[in-house]
């Protein structure tokens, strides 16, 4: 028969190992996210430099102010679309990273809850008479903590969905504004 102290010691060791595993996993995912953002930024900077050079050469070749303003207007729409594409890609990286963090954390919490419930059940089998209230309190606390986590998880998911919706709305508005500006500039 395993003593209560041994059970707690084993449970504590298991929790520390699980925490280290989760921390390592989340750190690796965070580095992957940073790598993706750096790669995206490097790609954007490289293409931006090439496109800027070409745009300046076009503007310098304008024969009169009318041609200059027409070229400027023609470049506004593609530039706005590129900025929006960048924002979408960045939001996609952030959403993906958040999703991976959530999955890893949920899996860890589910496993920890299972282990804690099993430990409480095992301890309650060997608990002295009269400790039923303490065991019931522990089970209630575990249930409340799980319910609290589920509520936080739902709230976080709703916040992410709202952010994605706001980005989509902003993208639509910016595209429409760029199209209007391009149309006005082209008419002049």
Image (cartoon, grey):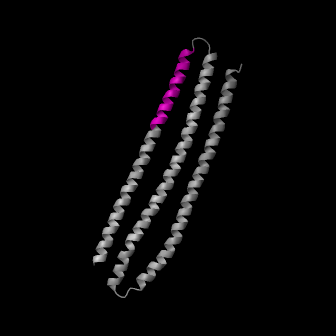
User: Quarter of the image containing the N terminus?
Assistant: top right
Q: Nearer the viewer, residue 6 or 95?
A: 95
Q: Is residue 166 left or right of residue 118?
A: left
Magenta stretch secondary structure, dominant = helix
Q: In the rendering, at what x and y percent does residue 85 appear? A: 44, 63
Q: Image check: 177 left or right of 107?
A: left
Taking the spot 67% from the left edge, 21% from the top edge, the residue there is 4
Q: Which of the 4 quarters of the picture holds residue 58? A: bottom left
Residue 15 percent location from the top left of the image: 63, 34
Q: Is residue 114 above or below residue 52?
A: above
* Residue drawn at point x = 33 percent, y = 68 percent: 179
Q: Is residue 34 magenta?
A: no
Query: In x, y percent, where is residue 63?
Result: 37, 88
- The residue located at (42%, 52%) in the rendering is 164
Where is 188 relative to 8, above or below? below
- Give me the residue at 57% from left, 12% from top: 130
Q: Residue furthest top?
A: 129
> Which region of the structure is painted magenta?
131-151
- In this picture, is 58 found above or below 148? below
Image quadrant where residue 167 sits = bottom left
Can you tell which quarter of the image residue 5 is in?
A: top right
Q: Is residue 149 magenta?
A: yes
């Amino acid at each position: 028969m395993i003593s209560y102290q041994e059970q707690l010691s084993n449970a504590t060791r298991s929790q520390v190992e699980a925490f280290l595993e989760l921390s390592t996993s989340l750190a690796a995912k965070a580095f992957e996210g940073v790598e993706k953002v750096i790669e995206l930024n490097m790609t954007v900077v490289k293409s931006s430099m090439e496109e800027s050079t070409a745009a300046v050469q076009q503007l310098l070749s304008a024969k009169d102010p009318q041609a200059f303003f027409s070229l400027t207007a023609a470049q506004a729409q593609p530039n706005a679309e590129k900025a929006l594409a960048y924002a979408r890609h960045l939001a996609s990286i952030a959403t993906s990273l958040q999703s991976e963090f959530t999955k890893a954390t949920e899996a860890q919490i589910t496993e920890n809850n299972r282990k804690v419930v099993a430990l409480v059940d095992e301890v309650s089998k060997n608990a002295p008479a009269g400790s039923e209230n303490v065991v019931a309190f522990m089970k209630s606390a575990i249930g409340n903590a799980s319910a609290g986590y589920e509520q936080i998880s739902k709230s976080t998911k709703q916040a992410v969905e709202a952010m994605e919706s706001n980005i989509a709305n902003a993208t639509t508005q910016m595209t429409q504004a760029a199209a209007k500006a391009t149309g006005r500039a082209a008419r002049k």
